[in-house]
Amino acid sequence: MNESNNPTSHFRQPLLLTPFHDRARALSQVDSFVPWAGYTTVDVFTTMEQEYFAIRNATTLYDLTPMVKYRIAGPDANRFLNRLVTRDLRKLKVSRVSYCVWCNDAGNIIDDGTVFRLAENEYRLCTAERQLDWLLDSAIGFDVQISEVTAEIAALAMQGPTSCAVLKQVGLAGVERLKPFEFGNFEVAGLPIMVSRTGFTGDLGYELWVDPQQANALWDALMSAGRSRGIRAIGSRALNIARIEAGFLLPNVDFMSAEGSIRIGTGRSPLELGLGWLVDFGKGHFTGRRALLEQQRRGLRRQLVGLDIAGSKPALNALLYTDRTGRKEVGSISSAVWSPTCKRNIALAMVEAPHFEVGAMVWAEVYLNRELVWERRMCRAQVVEKPFFAPERRRLTPPADF
């Protein structure tokens, strides 16, 4: 066939299709797709509300295939990763997962992601954005091989209180024994899959990793087994509400990668993002250590915090002030939503010192569009602890059989 007549040629189909695309397209009622890391993914299948409540009350499937995946292997794999990230990965055992961040020399975050220890000298690094150049540059001097394997692995996020029950129903004996941030190998109808107890919802949930050739068979088996427990495919909009409730950060929303930022002062360190618990100064040198030590010594000038905001209108992108007159600006909101589960108007915001201490009061400048007429409101906001929602079931092992 002539390339110009090939409907799948790159200039006719600029976004890649995931192995689950045909199944997702069949369920899509509003034809709402968005790009993610070079793939086309569903933003919403039916309504955001239906999908959100499925996360908190049933089982949901979210196509995680576009998550960028790297295989890191070799005699120096652990030394390389421990030099790259701020967390001490010498403590990470085989069949365990660790959430990590990595920084540039100035201590500003390049990206965050999860590290899977597949074997003694083999790891998988999953990130939202492509990082191959940074990884290769950082690997100079280490005996390690790094390759992108995104297209070689299909992935599904299976989240919700009945997710474990559905996995057992489909035949994954022993999956209930997986602890948070642990993974194991199982079979579904003869199909080998890797299952990790990880997720982006702050709820009970798992992530399933499978050969792309087996993707549709896995999807069909899960949908059939989960029918009695309200299984539903979800898109990015519903997931966004859940991750804000969980206090999870989203790249290019709550922080910019230091490699992608242009303007001075827009970089953010893990200490400023409230991720100081991921920084282990006692493990030895890592990229950004000196800068982070100096920032810790000086004290933080700003920090990302959780806010509880008066009223019911989300304060997305609102500026924050010391009082309702709006004279002195002290921060801005990056993520905001009315939480249906918490029954609270919540937000994540970068706030200047000393106003980021828990209990501090600030004012949010919220603009409301009512039938094309804009109204400005100053809403009281209080700094609160994160996460906003943290059910016991997310850590219970074995989970309750809902």
Image (cartoon, helix red, strand yellow):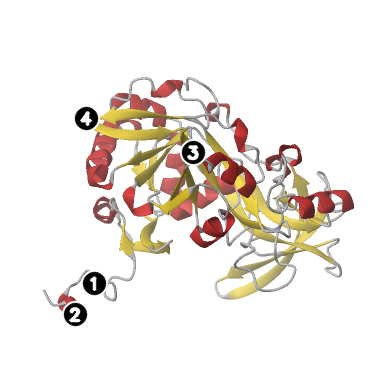
User: In this rendering, is residue 91 above or below 300?
Assistant: above
Assess whether mark 1 and mark 4 are in contact (beta carbons under 8 angstroms): no
* Label 4 packing within 10 angstroms: few (<14), some (14-19), many (20+): few
Query: Considering only order in the chain, which callout, 1 or 4, is on the residue closer to the N terminus?
Result: 1
The disc at residue 116 is 3
Front-lying residue, 318 or 191: 191
Q: Disc 3 and disc 4: Cα gap in Å?
A: 24 Å
User: Which residue position holds label 4?
Assistant: 190
Q: As shown in the figure, which amino acid type bears the numbered disc 3?
A: Phe
Q: Residue at x 29, y 50 (%)?
A: 20
Query: Considering only order in the chain, which callout, 4 or 3, is on the residue closer to the N terminus?
Result: 3
SS type, badge 4: loop
Give the x, y percent position of residue 143: 51, 47
Q: Is residue 217 visible?
A: yes
User: Which residue position holds label 1?
Assistant: 9
Front-lying residue, 365 or 104: 104
Give the x, y percent position of residue 167: 34, 29
Q: Residue at x 71, y 38 (%)?
A: 283
User: Which residue position holds label 2?
Assistant: 4
Q: Disc 1 and disc 3: Cα gap in Å?
A: 34 Å
User: In this rendering, is residue 181 above or below 240?
Assistant: above
Q: As shown in the figure, which amino acid type bears the numbered disc 4?
A: Gly
Query: Considering only order in the chain, which callout, 2 or 1, is on the residue closer to the N terminus?
Result: 2
Of circles 2 and 3, the one toward us is 3
Assess whether mark 3 and mark 2 are in contact (beta carbons under 8 angstroms): no
